[in-house]
Image (tube, rainbow, N blue to C red):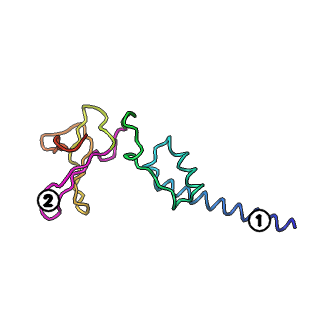
């Protein structure tokens, strides 16, 4: 009988280890979009409902408008999506993060050809050749 109990305990230990490993990969995969204060709640939901049944709230869905803004640092501050054939701008999207202070400007950084979008990043030492994010866009 004791041998069977050891087998059951071993099986449970293996299952718990597999579950925690899957949770870890799920958290790593979504770590960039889960705020630190929501990580515990997200982990609990993954354990209770399983990783495939857990919906991750993006920062735009669950963010508090009164909370302090996050700095973009190495993240894009915006995108300008264009028609790949004509390269005429169709719309712009602002990221949730902000440039650190007024000495930084959100300027065109990279043309992401496969996405058909210009990527904008915060830069401090801009030149006259830099293209700023459109002022009359949907930044608000």
**CA–CA distance in space, label 2 to label 1:** 63 Å
- 86 versus 57 height, above or below: below
Asked if residue 70 lies left or right of residue 46, the reply is left
At a point 51% along the width and 62% down the height, the residue shown is 52
Asked if residue 43 lies left or right of residue 86, the reply is right
Quarter occupied by residue 11: bottom right
Residue 92: x and y in percent read 22, 50
Q: Nearer the viewer, residue 42 or 26?
A: 42
Residue corresponding to mark 1 = 8
Badge 2 element: loop
The segment highlighted magenta reads: 70-95
Badge 1 element: helix
Residue 122: x and y in percent read 27, 41
Name the quadrant of the C terminus. top left
Q: Nearer the viewer, residue 108 or 135?
A: 135
At a point 80% along the width and 64% down the height, the residue shown is 6
- 114 versus 34 height, above or below: below
Q: Nearer the viewer, residue 23 or 55?
A: 55
- The stretch drawn in magenta includes residue 83: yes
Q: Earlier in the sequence, mark 2 or mark 1?
A: 1
Quarter occupied by residue 9: bottom right
Name the quadrant of the N terminus. bottom right
Residue 93: x and y in percent read 25, 49
Residue corresponding to mark 2 = 87
Quarter occupied by residue 70: top left
Q: Which mark is residue 125?
A: none
């Amino acid at each position: 009988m004791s041998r069977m109990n050891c087998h059951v305990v071993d099986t449970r230990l293996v299952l718990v280890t597999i579950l925690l490993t899957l949770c870890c990969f799920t958290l790593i995969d979504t770590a960039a979009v889960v705020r630190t204060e929501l990580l515990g709640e997200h982990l609990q939901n993954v354990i209770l409902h399983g990783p495939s049944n857990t919906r991750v709230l993006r920062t735009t869905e669950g963010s508090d408008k009164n909370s302090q803004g996050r700095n973009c640092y190495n993240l894009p501050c915006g995108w300008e999506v264009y028609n790949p054939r004509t390269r005429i701008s169709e719309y712009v999207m602002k990221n949730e993060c902000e440039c650190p202070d007024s000495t930084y400007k959100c300027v065109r950084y990279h043309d992401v050809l496969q996405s058909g979008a210009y990527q904008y990043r915060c830069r401090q030492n801009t030149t006259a050749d830099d293209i700023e994010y459109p002022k009359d866009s949907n930044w608000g």
